[in-house]
Image (spheres, rainbow, N blue to C red):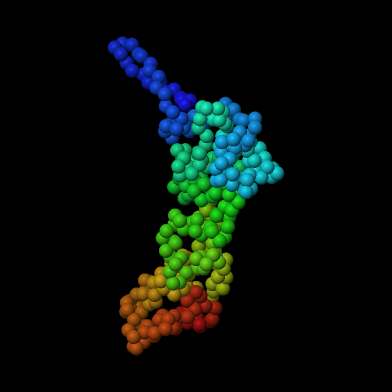
Amino acid sequence: MRCILQLVVIGIGLGILPILHATPWDKLDSESLEATLAQKFEEGQYSAKGADSCLMCHRQNAKVMAIFDGVHGQATTARSPMAGLQCEACHGPQGKHNKGGKEPMIGFGRQSKLPAAAQNSVCQGCHKDAQQMNWHNSVHNLEEVACVDCHQIHTANDPMLNKLTVNDACSSCHRREKADMNKRSSHPLKWQQMTCIDCHAPHGSPNEATLKEASVNDTCYGCHAEKRGPFLWEHAPVTESCITCHNPHGSMNEDLLQLRAPQLCQQCHANDGHASRVVAEGGVDAFGGAESCLNCHSQIHGSNHPSGSLLQR
């Protein structure tokens, strides 16, 4: 097996004796592997036969052959890797990999020794449009998530590009949100009538929680336009952020509320007369039935009535 040479210096008396130790390619650590691959790129020893050289050994692997089912394997598409350097466009120069040397190639996925940033740099060589401009500051990049942790390349159907599977892909990591999606009150995510990427930009965003819109409220108003206003009488927490009262991913309470009324209202409205009790007293007043505080203050998102200062009409 072809090896790289590591120079180990051992002092003997006043002299220095160099001893050469060989490390197999598959035993290289992450840093050494990355440096070796960088050297291969500098040498640029690409195969003259392209994918044909690779398929001499790898054509029996169904996952490898699935590349030809997707856009990355279409030689007739000018922007496809298969129209250029083919397999080596992503996996790097072949060098002597197929000549008994078993030189390392760029590997992707959780089993790869290459760090996520090195793997992602290959994808970003082509995918550098406006949607990727915030990637370097994104949570996914800072958490060292690799592109292939979400995307599948050797396939005709990338789950991240299919509205029926994208939620499953996201919730495989975002477990708390997955639990919220299955609570009694939730957006229709579990029925694939909405997707996570309807609200969030997975490749990064300059906005809070990688939202596509500038704020939480602007995101919500995309569907709930009737709550936008402007209103003559505004409710401060509504104006500030919808998530003050609502959990957008799901809740055990009606209407995605963080807490049930009157407890929710009493987070702000405490010790002001009739709202001072923490627990509703059934059969005594308006706290005891139906929608509690909202029995009277029904226009909780804002009112345009001249007498609606208390959001009652």
Give the answer, above or below, for where 140 lies relative to 122: below
Q: Nearer the viewer, residue 284 or 238?
A: 284
Viewer-closest of 309 and 205:
205
Residue that appears at 29% across and 12% down: 13
Q: Hey, which quadrant is residue 292 in on the image?
A: bottom left
- Residue 266 to residue 166: above or below: below
Whether residue 72 is situated above or below residue 11 in the rendered picture: below
Asked whether residue 42 appears in the rendered view, the answer is no
Count of labels in the image = 0
Of residues 15 and 98, the one drawn nearer to the viewer in this rendering = 98
Residue 87 lies, with reference to residue 149, above or below; the image says above
Residue at the top extreme, as displayed: 14
Residue 180 in sight here: yes
Residue at (36, 84) in percent of width and height:
288
Q: Which residue lies at the image location 69% right of the left edge and 45% below the top edge?
A: 77
Give x and y (percent) for residue 231.
Answer: 54, 74
In the picture, measured across the screen, residue 114 lies left or right of residue 164, that is left
Q: Position of residue 202 (x, y in %)?
A: 52, 53
